[in-house]
Amino acid sequence: MSLNRCQKCWTLVLLLIFLSAPAYAQESGSDVKTRIIIIGDPGKLHDGKNAVVEAARQFVSPDDSKTTILFLGDNIYPKGLEDEEDKSYPASANVLKTILTSFKDYQAKVFVVPGNHDWQRGRYDGWQNVKRQQQFVKDLNQPNTIFLPEAGCPGPEEVTIDDNLVLIIMDTQWWLHQNPKPGINDNCDCKTEEDVIARLKDIVHRNPNKKFLFASHHPLRSYGEHGGYYTWKQHIFPLTGFSEKAYVPLPVIGSLYPIVRGKFGNIEDLIHPDYKEMIRGIEKSMATAPDVTYAGGHDHNLQLIREGNRNHIISGSGTNRSQVKKGKGSLFASDQNGFAEIIYTIDGKQIISFYEVDEHSIRKEVYRFEVPEIIIEKRQNEIASKEISDDSITVRIAPEYDQVGKSHRAIWGEHYRKIWATPVTIKVFHVNEQNGGLKILKKGGGQQTKSLRMEDKNGKQWVLRTIQKNPEMALPSNLRATVAKSIIQDQISAANPFAPLTVPVIAEAANVPHSNPQILFVPDDPALGIYQSEFANTVCIFEEREPGADETYSTDDVLKKLEKDNDNSVDQKAVLRARMLDLLIGDWDRHEDQWRWKQEKTDKKSIYSPIPRDRDQVFFISTGFVPSIARLKWIMPKFQGFGDEIRDVNGFMFNARYFDRSFLNGLNEKDWQEVISGVQTSVTDDIIRQSIGKLPDTVYKQIGEKLIHNLISRRNSLMTEGLTYYNFLSREIDIPASDKKDLIHVETLSNGDAKISLQKIKKDGIAGDVFYQRVIDNAITKEVRLYGRGDEDVFVVDGNYKPGFKLRLVGGGSVDSIYVSRSAAKRSKLLIYDRSDKKNVFPDHGVRLLTSTSNDVNLYNPRAFNYNKLAPLATIAFNLDDGILLGAGGVFTKYGFRREPFASRHRIMVGHALATDASFLRYKGDVTNFIGKAALDMYLNVAAPDNTVNFFGVGNETTFDNVSDPQIRYYRTRYNFIDTQVRLKFALAKSFNFFAGVAGQYYNMDPDDNKDRFVNIYAAQQSGPTLFDHRVYLGGVAGYEVDTRNNSMLPVRGFHWRTSFTGMQQVNAGNSFGQVRTEMSMYISFNRYPKFVIAHRIGAGTSIGDPEFFQMFYMGGDGGLLGYRKNRFAGNSMLYDNLELRIKLFDFTSYLFPGSVGMVLFNDVGRVWAKNESSDLWHWGYGGGFYIIPAESIVITGVAGYSQEGVLPYVNLGFRF
């Protein structure tokens, strides 16, 4: 190589070093306090790698402990991490592993946050996919890599990065997710949106002088696609949004989607009301923090938007790219792949940089912004106080409950009002003195209570929880300003504030673990710090957080451990003792999160026993008119209250419906009798008296003897009630195995009984220890479901008898072997569910095989149970034609195995019109999974006897002459009519159904019922058979329905389109006809709880052939054309358009029920077409009225319709569309 060439090479090297100097100096970190690297939406590999992640890896030194890397969701495209047996799993797992192991053995901290694609793009199994991704990250065993928030919970998680920077991580998809997700009964610290907002406020409150970085998948600002920006390509080639190669030009039509989505958005767009509500809640809760940077992904681009002193970073081009523009506040925007970086320096500077990355992982800094310094004033936390030095104080907890009149007590109940108002002497709580001095860890609490988690000097944790509850956060935000808050607050008087004091004595006697609560007065104590104003001068319960064990587990944790290993088990007799104690003391609120679990290890095995907590509902009572309605069997029977008898034990146990089926499935009737007898024997009269004696003297004098009487009575009936509940649980039994190899053995016995055993399969293939065994009583049990779950399982059904109950064998994800002896085989009773694309071994006789290539066929859902429900129906309406119309009926809903949203639903209604003396019967039946996944849809309308309708003739310009008194009498026609359809309905997508089936009609008119009526003139003009001959029609029907409405009863947003095609042939005659009918409705609003809704409907229909007068299209009345009589115009075809403005005026405050009042303004236009008629006339109707929505449950509308024929009033239940 020549000297000249060497000089050129060295010059090039020096030039490269010079150009990269800023980055090198930055990486050296001499003045860097903290560095954050933000990568969003990285969930896809190209040629086996992710260029952006690789560039970031090269950017970070392995020994750099000052750096934190954030992966902000959509870590796996397109639907997150599916089940291991799904064909997408290997590729998906490889994506996540490749991304995260890039930083293996690095000193940098790595946080993985889920996005909407990780939640299966918002679909049904999204929660499971997120939990599976979390476990995958954990199993990587990378100590520096953490998945947050855990378990599909929303967070927000607080991470202290340094002494001046707090990282807040939130799973924003939880907020937007419309399918199953953690809720009120799950083990998340924040269970509701309101809890999330409260936690955010608390984090800000506890860190008054710090900077915040809020990290989530969804940004709070964006000028990308999710912010409503679309390019010309998406207008001309709209299908490229679904497939990159689908360049099919669809001008005009293609613009519909981006225009509609850009204006109204789907739930993943910033303009959607739910998304806007989330943004509003987050920003409001962070408002008091002076320095906040929001970081998100979601849109596949790079953006920096600054509003005031808030920075919004969008870094979502970790693998994909999408369009972006600059808008208000935009400082930077790029549609290239890349990542963002934030530097926090030692001297307090904050520098935001963006790097674009090419396909070779070469990064280039393209923008740098130094955030203007914000002077943060130090905030003083201490509040002036009025300390109480005494050890005790006499207080009334809530005297306001007793300050109501007789009518209020009659309507809402007497409850424990006097107890809440009774003066009691209790000890005073001092933070620095209680239990040797306590340290406040954090604020907690549920929807209605406030609590503080504390720790003593020995590391033991305690909880201080307010007795008085605040129901505001338990209500939807649109009801918080209404009387609903006051009503729920008033109903807290149904709980006994001192009842928790009585539990330890009875629980100890019954051998049930318990806390030892104290009721204390919290003074205005400066040691409360930032919580002083919230907790000062309150009465609280103080108790151990983890009673009975140093370390406990949540219910979800225990379920996971049972699934993971068959060496893990639950002490089900201990569970039953605790549940019988719940029944005895009337504690109805025993959902999954009301329990902790203690672990006892023996060799390789672990046994988990339950520890009940939160005894707030002990001795709950229910009196008064409204509560007596609420506790009805078909509404909320769990609120039946504590009395001397248990009226409906099955309904009382509602809140534990999943818990009991998971943890009481191994006990037989003898076990129940033994446990219940033990509780009855140990809880003696003397124990009960000791227990109630723990009440304050002033309280005992009022209710002590009554509580003792009720407890003794309930104890004496505990065997009867307990066994009733045993029978209820035993009707359908779920028995899951584990993810290890299991032998599931069913031995059929005489009388249809069966012995079910679950055993471990050892490594040598030999059956090992039995970890489940129960004899199933055929007289009680109707169905048993056995789940193999993971690994290779063996099912054996044998014996000399046929099973007497239905037995479902559900294989696991691996290869299973299922053997059924011919002596035990019975096709109607044995059903096998497993994968058809696996090499499973199935019997070839005596069973029904229900196989699929979908993972869902192996799914075990411990929350699948629902109570069957029978409820009454009623209706009332008014119009000038029918007068007052009254109806009554019922609906019965039955639930079954894997039949969603129910197994069957049957509605029946009978009614009578007072003005015409006409009657009707209407029936609607739905049966899901009737044939495969097709549902059965049945409809019957019997307009008889004395069915009366208006008939003015056929045509668009028929007259309404005054020839009778009243005028309408001449046009009324009586005939009996039956219309029925039986259809199969196929769900082609979540919101799209196709249906097809058979239809029938019966018609009969009596001439004596129609003397001197217009229909006789019409009949005389018709050729062929007389109208007074009965007719029977048979035919078919088909159609489709698209329904995206947010609520079918009170829609404020969405779309509904139904089209049907009907063909009918008259039996024993030549007449036939066909009809097409379509109706499309759209609902537009701009907020989550809108005051203004635009409702628009357009409908049309046309006939082929010659329908008879009772089969034609009618217009007029409360359907498509208000302001005219019912059925005012009849024709072979029709077209109508309805526009309504629904405006909420105000919420009203009634102590009978809360509600809202609104105004309806409408404009209708329509017409019909008839053969041999030439008409250009369109009929217009317009008007308005009011609606009332009591208790947010039903809609009552009253409107007046104006037209050229007069003014007509209408009163109905519900909006007309």
Image: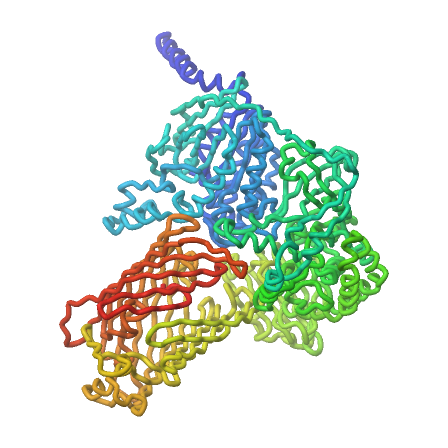
Q: Quadrant of residue 65?
A: top right
Residue 459 position in % (x across, y down): 75, 36
Q: Pick whichever, 1145 or 912, lies toward us.
A: 1145
> In the current view of this chain or complex, which residue is farthest to the right?
686
Q: Which residue sits at x=74%, y=69%?
A: 669
Place of residue 540 in the rendered image (x, y in percent of width and height, measured from the top left): 70, 45
Residue drawn 36% across the image and 78% down it: 999
Q: Position of residue 1214 (x, y in %)?
A: 41, 65
Vertical comparison of 13 with 407: above or below: above
- Residue 909 versus residue 880: which sits nearer the camera? 880
The quadrant the C terminus occupies is bottom left
- Residue furthest front in the image: 405
Query: What colour scheme was applied to this rendering of the protein?
Result: rainbow
Find residue 824 and report its horizontal and vertical position in percent.
65, 74
Q: Quadrant of residue 1045?
A: bottom left
| Residue furthest out toward the top | 3
Is residue 739 placed above or below 723 in the rendered structure?
above
Q: Residue at x 23, y 48 (%)?
A: 251
Taking the image as drawn, is residue 1004 in sight?
A: yes
1087 on left or right of 626: left
Q: Image quadrant for the N terminus? A: top left
Q: Residue at x 44, y 21 (%)?
A: 370
983 left or right of 391 in image: left
Q: Is residue 961 above or below residue 504?
A: below
